Amino acid sequence: MSLLENAVVQEQRRIEYMIEKYEAELANLPKGALIAKMIKGNQYYYLQYRSGKKTISKYVGRAGDKVEKLQQQIERRRHIQSMLKALSEEYATAQKMMEVCI
């Protein structure tokens, strides 16, 4: 195995490891978006997501630590999803490089 092939194989393993870790973390993060609704002058927050064809809204509460924590988790989920997309593109590039090396 040449040095280049070895480097590409190591990169593929790294990408596979990162994808596995990110997908495991995604499983523990909430799906959807945080929606604020104004009801009788009070602002209430709901977690809104899709389940099949249905849109589900779960009550979260009023503004506070719980809402902020949930918003951070949703932002983390979006970040991880973008990282997974980039990693899958890198993996495809590595696959093409392996085809050229062989």
Image (cartoon, rainbow, N blue to C red):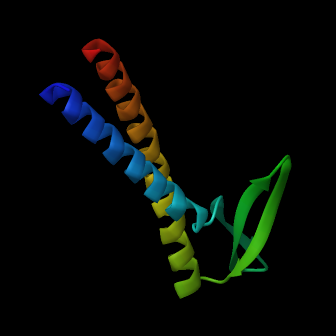
Q: Residue at (73%, 58%) from the top-left corner?
A: 49
For this orientation, the residue located farthest to the bottom is: 65
Residue 101 location, x and y as percent?
Answer: 25, 16
Q: Is residue 85 above or below residue 71?
A: above
Residue 66 location, x and y as percent?
Answer: 57, 84
Q: Is residue 33 above or below residue 86?
A: below
Residue 54 location, x and y as percent?
Answer: 86, 52
Q: Residue at (64%, 60%) from the top-left corner?
A: 31
- Say if residue 42 shows up in the picture: no
Q: Residue at (51%, 77%) from the top-left corner?
A: 68
Nearer to the camera, 102 or 65: 102
| Number of residue marks | 0
Q: Is residue 39 left or right of residue 94?
A: right
Q: Quadrant of residue 34?
A: bottom right
For this orientation, the residue located farthest to the left is: 3
For this orientation, the residue located farthest to the right is: 54
Q: Residue at (34%, 25%) from the top-left corner?
A: 93
Nearer to the camera, 94 or 86: 94
Residue 22 location, x and y as percent?
Answer: 46, 56
Q: Quadrant of residue 70?
A: bottom right
Q: Is residue 53 above or below residue 36?
A: above
Quarter placement of the N terminus: top left
Nearer to the camera, 28 or 15: 15
- Say if residue 97 shows up in the picture: yes
Q: Is residue 78 left or right of residue 98?
A: right
Q: Quadrant of residue 96?
A: top left
Q: Is residue 39 left or right of residue 36?
A: right
For this orientation, the residue located farthest to the front is: 1
